Image (cartoon, coloured by chain):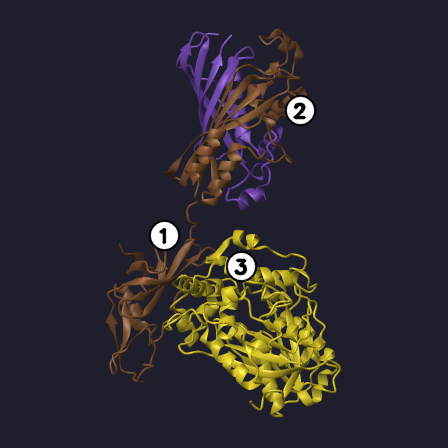
Amino acid sequence: MSTLSGAAAIVGIGATAFSKASGRTELRLAAQCVRSAIADAGLSPSDVDGLVTFTMDTNSEIAVAREVGIPELSFFSRISYGGGAACATVQQAAMAVATGVASVVVCYRAFNERSGQRYGRVQAAAAQQPTSTGVDNGWHYPMGLGTPAATVAMFARRYMHEYGATSEDFGRVAVVDRKHAATNPHAWFHGRPITIEDHQSSRWIAEPLRLLDCCQESDGGVALVVTTTERARDLPHRPAVVRAAAQGSGADQYVMNSYYRPDITGLPEMGLVGRQLWGQSGLSPEDMSAAVLYDHFTPFVLVQLEELGFCKPGEAKDFIADGTLELDGRLPLNPHGGQLGEAYIHGMNGIAEAVRQLRGTAANQVAAVRNVLVTAGTGVPTSALVLSA
Amino acid sequence: MIRDVADQVIARGESSRRAAPDPVNVPMVRHWVEALGDRNPIYTDPVAAAASVHGGLVAPPAMVQVWTMFGLRCTRPADDPLGAMMSVLDEAGFTSVVATNCEQTYHRYLRPGEEVTVGARLTDVVGPKRTALGDGWFVTTVSTWYVGDEPVAEMLFRVLKFRPPAEEPVGDVLRPVVSLDTEFFWAGTRVGELRIQKCLACGEVRHPPGPMCPGCGSTELTHVVADGVGEIYSYVVHHHPPMPGKRLPFVVALVELAEGVRLLAELIDADPAEVRVGLPVRVDFQRIDDELTLPVWRVRS
Amino acid sequence: MMVAVGDTLPELVIEVTPTFVVSTAFATRDYQDVHHDRDAAVERGSKDIFLNILTDTGLVQRFVTDWAGPNALVRDIAIRLGVPCYAYETLTFTGHVSERDGKLVVVDVVGRNSIGDHVTGTVRVELP
C-alpha cells in the first residue's frame, strides 16, 4: 500500500446548475462552485491554500482565488489531456495535503461547453497549435478525423470487428445512464429515459457511433474540497476517503489518436491506472459498490470494464447484459446518469456523485456503499480514484 | 427491399376512400379564385353561371384536389400508398423529394353541395435512376375522386425520391503543423511519394515519424518510399458535424501498409456501405495547393 | 370561336409576391411550411418560399380559360414541374394550340420565370 492511500479525503462538493446556456462567465461559474464546495465542507475561503484544475480550464487559479476571497495560495497545479485530468486533480490535491504542501485544496472545473466553445465540434485552433501535440494532430485533422466522436469511432469499429460487439451493446450503456438520469432531479435528462430502440434509431454521428452514444454538451461547474483524512473527521460530512488515486499514460500514447499500437481494442493507459488502484488500495473490482465510469462515448465504457479487471477483454458486452449496471445490479453504473444523462462537466460531476453515494445522499442511492470507483476521460492519458467510506 | 415493398403496395390496389371534410362549396371556391385571380364567372356569379353551358355554379376543375387536402391537423391514413413508399425510401437514404409530374383528368365539373371522396393507389416505382439531382426512384400514384361511386376526376402524380448529393465542403482543409522532423513526409506527398521514416542505425520503420528512433535512440533517420498498398485496419464514416474541406458523409480509414506501419487518410470515391475492415486500398494524392498535398486512399480492386 | 393549330394565346403575367405565394397556398389548403414560412424554406435549402403545385395547375387552367371563355370545358391538365418559382419572381405563361380535333383542342403551355421553365404542360379543352 502506498503512503497516499487513506491520507486524504474529499470533504466538500459544490456545483452550479447544469444547463445549455448558463448566461454567466466561466469565471463566475468557477467562483460559484468553489464557494459552494467550501461552504459544504464547513470551511471558509480563508481555510483554503491550494487550487487545482485542468490545463483546459480558462479560469486562472489567481482569478478564482480573488473572486472567492481565498487570500493566499501555497499550492496550485494543473493537469493536461482534457477530461483525463478529472481524477488527477484530486490526486494532486491529495498528494499536496498528505505531504503538508497545502492544508485545504479545492479542485475545480467550470465551462460554458455548450453555449461557448463546444468540444464536440472541430477544434481548429487546437489542431494547429505550434506544439508537439499540434504536429501529432497533423496526422489526423487534415485527413478529416477531427472530432472526439470520430476519434473514438475509429477504436470502436476495430473493437466490434475483433470481439463481435454491436451497436446495441454500446446502446445498453446509454440506456442505463439515461434510466438513472431520469430519476435524478439534477440531471439534464431528468424524466427522459430512452429505450434501446431509441438508441438504434438515433442518427449516425460518426459510424459506428450514433447520436445517443455521445454525451451531451453542458454549461456548468463542479468543485471538490480535499484535506487530510485526520482533519476530515472534524468536518460536518462523512468524508470520502481517497483510498487510491492514479494517473496513466500508455506506450505510444497520443491524445485520442493512439492508433499505432499493436492492438487498439484496449485502453492500456486505463489498465495501468487500474493496476495502481488495486495495488494502492488492496481492494479488487469485486469490492466496488458502484462505478462512475467516464462516458463521453459509450464504447469506451465497455473497454474500461475490461481494463479495470471487471471482465476479460472483449467480454464487457456479456458482463453488462443482464442488468449488471442497474442500481440493484452487481456493479451499479453512473447512478447520477453519467455525462450522457446528467451533464458533461469533464468528469468532475462523476466524482461529486461518488462522494454523495458514500455520504448516502445521492438521488439514486445505492444500498450499503463502501467503495466507489471513479474514472476520468478515456482515449487520452487518464486517471481514476477509489473513494471509500 | 425497395422493389419488394413497391410490389406489395402496388398489389394492394386502391386505398380506402377518404371523405373531403366539406362538401364542394362556394366560399372555398371564392377564396381560391380570389387568390389565383381567376375571373371566370361560372364559379361565383350565379347569374352568369346560369346562362353558361353549366346552367349553374360549378367549381374550378383544378380545385378537385383541394377538397381532399389533409389540411393542418389531419394525418396520413395508414394505408396511404405514397406514405408507405416514402418511408421505405427514406430508410434507404433517398431522403429528398421533388414532384415531377401532375396530370389531372376531369370527367365532369363539380357543383356546390357535392360530397367528394378520394382513393389512391401506387402504380409504378422505377429506379434507381441517376438524375441531375442525385440517384433516385420515380414513384407514381394515381388518385381517383368520386361522388358516390361515380369517378369524377383522376390525377397521376409522380415524385422523384432522391439521395441528396453530398454537401459541398465548407471552409478549407485543416493544415498540418509541420516541423523539421516531419517535413520530409509532406515534401513527399507533393511529389507523389508516401514516405515512411526509417532509422539508419537499426532499420526500424515508423509512422507517424519523430526526431528520435524509439527503438535505439538514434537521431540518424531517413525514409523509404512506401508502395502505398495496404488493407483497412479500421474506419469511420463521418456524418456530423461538418469538417473543414470535407464533403459529408466521408470515410476516414486507418490502413495497415505492406511496410508494417499504419497510416490514416480519407478514403475517397468509395460507397460508405461497401467499406469494411480488411478492404484492400492503395494510396493516391490529393493536391490542395502548392504547399499541401494530402495522401488519400482508394479502393484497390 | 375561330381556332387553328399554331394560334398563340395571350400572355399571362403573374407577379409572384409573397402574398400571392401564401394566399394561393392557403386557398388550396396546402400548409407545408415552404409555401408560407421563409425561415423554414431557407432552412430546407430553398432561396425563399415558393409556389405549390396545386396553384400551378390552377394557373395553367386560368391561362387557358381566360382565352377560351366561360363556356369552354377543361378536360385535362398535365404538367411537368421544372425550376422552383420563388417569391418575388415574375411568372409568364405563354402557349399555343398544338392540336385540334373538332371542338377538342390541345394547348401547349409554358410558365417561365427568371431561372427557367417553372412548368410545362398541355391542357385539353373542349370549346363551345
Amino acid type of the residue tagged 3 in the rendering: Gly
Q: Which residue is mark 1?
A: B274
Of labels 2 and 1, earlier in sequence is: 2
Expressed as whole percent of the image width and height from the top left, the position of residue A129 reads 45, 72
Secondary structure type for disc 2: loop
Expressed as whole percent of the image width and height from the top left, the position of residue C3 reads 44, 10
Q: Which residue is mark 3?
A: A171
Left or right: B195, with A135 as reference point = left
The image quadrant of residue B255 is bottom left
Eye-nearest disc, 3 or 2? 3
Q: Report the chain shown in brown.
A: B
Q: Which mark is residue A318?
A: none
Q: Which residue is mark 2?
A: B22
Secondary structure type for disc 3: helix
Amino acid type of the residue tagged 2 in the rendering: Asp
Q: Are marks 2 and 1 in contact (CB under 8 Å)?
A: no
Q: Quadrant of the C terminus of chain A?
A: bottom right
In the rendered image, residues at marks 1 and 3 fall on the same chain: no
The image quadrant of residue A324 is bottom right
Q: CA distance from mark 2 to mark 1?
A: 52 Å
- Is residue A77 visible in the rendered image? The answer is no
Foreground residue among C96 and A2: A2
Residue at the (26%, 64%) spot, across then down: B228
Q: Report the chain shown in yellow.
A: A
Eye-nearest disc, 2 or 1? 1
Q: Are marks 3 and 2 in contact (CB under 8 Å)?
A: no
Chain C appears in which tint? Answer: purple
Residue at the (66%, 20%) spot, across then down: B25
